[in-house]
Image: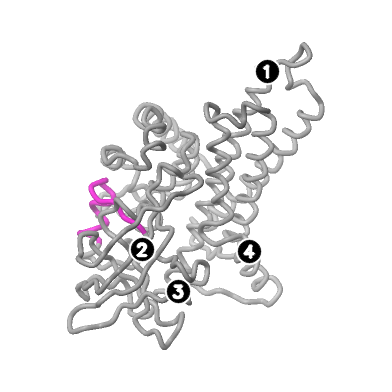
Amino acid sequence: MYFTEEHELFRKSLKDFLQIEVVPHIDKWEEDGVVERFIWKKMGDMGFFGINYPEEFGGLNLDLFYTVIFLEELQKVNSGGFAANIWAHAYLAMTHLDKEGSQEIKEKYLAPSISGDKIGCLCITEPFGGSDVSGMRTTAVKKDNTFVLNGSKTFITNGVYSDYLVVAAKTSPEKGGKGISIFVVDRDTPGITATKLNKLGWRASDTAEIAFDNVTIPEGNLMGETDMGFPYIMQHFALERLIMAVNAHARAEFALAYTIQYMKDRNAFGKSIATFQALRHSVAQMASEVEVCKTFNYNTVKRLDDKEYVVKEATMAKLTATKMADDVMYQCLQLLGGYGYMEDYPLARMFRDSRLGPIGGGTSEILREIIAKMVIDGKDYKPAT
């Protein structure tokens, strides 16, 4: 229904690339807490960062189901941290460059991001205001032909080793959420410091708390219109949440496939544990839930690709798929018994990595309130104009 022969050829090419170029390095990156620079360039050379971006800047301008394939296959290398580094660059930082950046910004930052020569990060979350975007405290004060940034951000993927930062800051603090603007900032600008955070999972990913101390940037680094940052952010949240929903169904599917094979190979009481009814029915329930989430995610991707405004559906997709994936990881680890708890088996890492799903990109609690506002209060979130 959604994938053509060309899509499947792309999937095979990507799968082969990941197995040859990425999988052999995953354990090292997990141990070191950093994804080595060479892989970014290799992925850029293959066109993987330009899937949805304009040909003018080196992109391929393909439909969103190529992105779905990209996300799904990234989950199958069993490193949520590596996957996060890649998609946070390609779909968080680069989305703002593409949608709000000037021609000059696109030439300076988007084109080398597509080629893998520059790495980006998106800086929205703050230590005192995670899901409360409008309550951010970071400011950008206009001074002559510059803006001066002060404040801090946290939980920033690619926050240590990226080359540039896409930063949300208040240009009109008196307007609250209506006074936020978006900027692109070079990493080597004086006044920027990054502190690496020690996480439960996503160990290969460099996640940071970032401080801005009188960081002076040219006014040309403003992206889009002044004080329009909040609707820009909200508009792109739909894509971010849908990405995390696709990630969730893909890692759950991968975990389940591994667990089924393990059950077929594992014998107890003289027969394969895949023949035990209680375990079979558990797998049947999980497989059903994965398929339901995947189908809804695909449907929502199709609507987004058709330019529909899918804030409600994307929010629902992330809420349900990330909860489902967490449940599947828990049960799959249980089905492996003691081996599930061993680091030599993939479920231990997958269990840790999956736990971020209901937290990042808007906690499940916040998502439920957003959905409640739409379905109970009749709130109609509008796209930025």
Identify residue for label 3.
Answer: 231
Looking at the rendering, the stretch of residues picked out in magenta corresponds to 106-121
Q: Give the Cα separation between the discs numbered 1 and 4.
A: 39 Å
Disc number for residue 158: none
> Mark 3 packing: few (<14 Cα in 10 Å), some, or many (20+)?
some
Q: Earlier in the sequence, mark 2 or mark 3?
A: 2
Query: Mark 2 falls on what kind of element?
Result: helix
Residue located at (41% from left, 76% from top): 137
In the displayed structure image, the side of residue 326 where residue 302 appears, left or right: left
Q: Earlier in the sequence, mark 2 or mark 1?
A: 2
Q: Amino acid at mark 3?
A: Pro
**Contact (CB < 8 A) between labels 2 and 1?**
no
Q: Is 319 or 297 nearer to us in this picture?
A: 319
Q: Position of residue 298 (x, y in %)?
A: 57, 48
Q: Residue furthest left?
A: 145
Query: Mark 3 falls on what kind of element?
Result: helix
Residue located at (59% from left, 51% from top): 299
Residue located at (68% from left, 23% from top): 263
Identify residue for label 4.
Answer: 365
**Is residue 108 on the magenta stretch?**
yes
Disc number for residue 266: 1
Query: Mark 4 falls on what kind of element?
Result: helix
Query: If the image is split into quadrants, where does the N terminus sit?
Result: top right
In the displayed structure image, the side of residue 36 where residue 249 appears, left or right: right
Query: Mark 1 falls on what kind of element?
Result: loop
Q: Is 342 or 297 nearer to us in this picture?
A: 342
Q: Give the Cα separation between the discs numbered 2 and 3.
A: 12 Å
Q: Earlier in the sequence, mark 1 or mark 3?
A: 3
Q: Amino acid at mark 2?
A: His
Identify residue for label 2.
Answer: 96
Q: Give the Cα separation between the discs numbered 1 and 3.
A: 52 Å
